[in-house]
Image: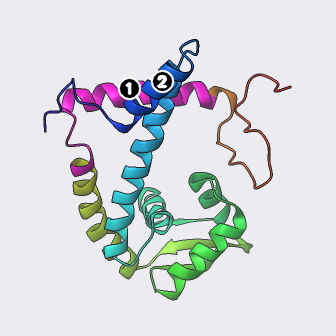
Amino acid sequence: MDTDKGASDHVDQVLADWARERPDWDMSAAAVIARLGRASAYIERGLHDTFEEFGLNRVEFDVLATLTRSGPPKRLPPGQLVRALMRSSGAITHIVDRLEAGGLVERTLDEDDRRSILVGLTKKGSALFERVAAAHLENERTLLEALTPEEQQTLAWTLKKLLLGFEAESAQPVMPRSGRKRHRFHRRKVL
């Protein structure tokens, strides 16, 4: 899909409004952040719709994917799921509970340390993952069809560079809690 370079998006209108009201402000960073945010919202909606077709949400799919990519025997301790998925241990417990109730994962004792448990993919979970993953990959291609393969590679590289900058400061993003006034990524003290 070719997009006219002269076409305007929602962010262009917002930037034009700010240029009119505050021509002294440099809005170049806001142009990037606003577009990342809007693109993220469209992508999240598209991912949600595909996962919902299979009775999953994104984080449930991510648990199945993380277990699958861990290799045989496709089992991990809950702590590794916490780190891989950037969720709290309580959230992972609830997610695993739902997946276990659906027969997609099972909890077993760790043979090497019987005080610990492992979360493992069941045959049913593995079969569902294969079906969802095929639809998910096709959906991702559809979501990015406005970009040529070369533009996708450039965007992937540019976003990787941005993430490397963030990850140099913090290995995992820390999501703000309600009532929290500033995000951990702020480099400058706000007065």
Question: Can you identify the residue that label 1 sits on?
Answer: 157
Mark 1: amino acid: Trp
Mark 2: amino acid: Lys
Q: In this rendering, does residue 152 appear at all? A: yes
Judged from this view, the residue extending furthest toward the front is: 21
Judged from this view, the residue extending furthest toward the left is: 1
What is the C-alpha distance between the residues marked 1 and 2?
Answer: 6 Å
Residue 100 location (% of width, % of height): 53, 83
Query: Residue 42 vs residue 62: left or right?
Result: left
Under tag 1, what secondary structure?
Answer: helix
Q: Residues within 10 Å of mark 1 (few under 14, many from 20)?
A: few
Question: Can you identify the residue that label 2 sits on?
Answer: 161
Residue 21 location (% of width, % of height): 54, 22
Magenta stretch, overall SS: helix
Judged from this view, the residue extending furthest toward the right is: 191
Under tag 2, what secondary structure?
Answer: helix
The N terminus - image quarter: top left
Above or below: residue 25 compared with residue 91:
above
Q: In this rendering, does residue 112 appear at all? A: no
Mark 1 vs 2: CB contact within 8 A: yes
Residue, x 37% and y 51% (percent of image)? 42
Above or below: residue 21 compared with residue 107:
above
Residue, x 21% and y 24% (percent of image)? 5
Residue, x 36% and y 31% (percent of image)? 156
Q: Which residues are magenta?
A: 142-167
Query: Residue 126 vs residue 98: left or right?
Result: left
Residue, x 48% and y 20% (percent of image)? 20
The C terminus - image quarter: top right
Residue 123 location (% of width, % of height): 37, 79
Q: Is residue 171 magenta?
A: no
Residue 187 location (% of width, % of height): 74, 24
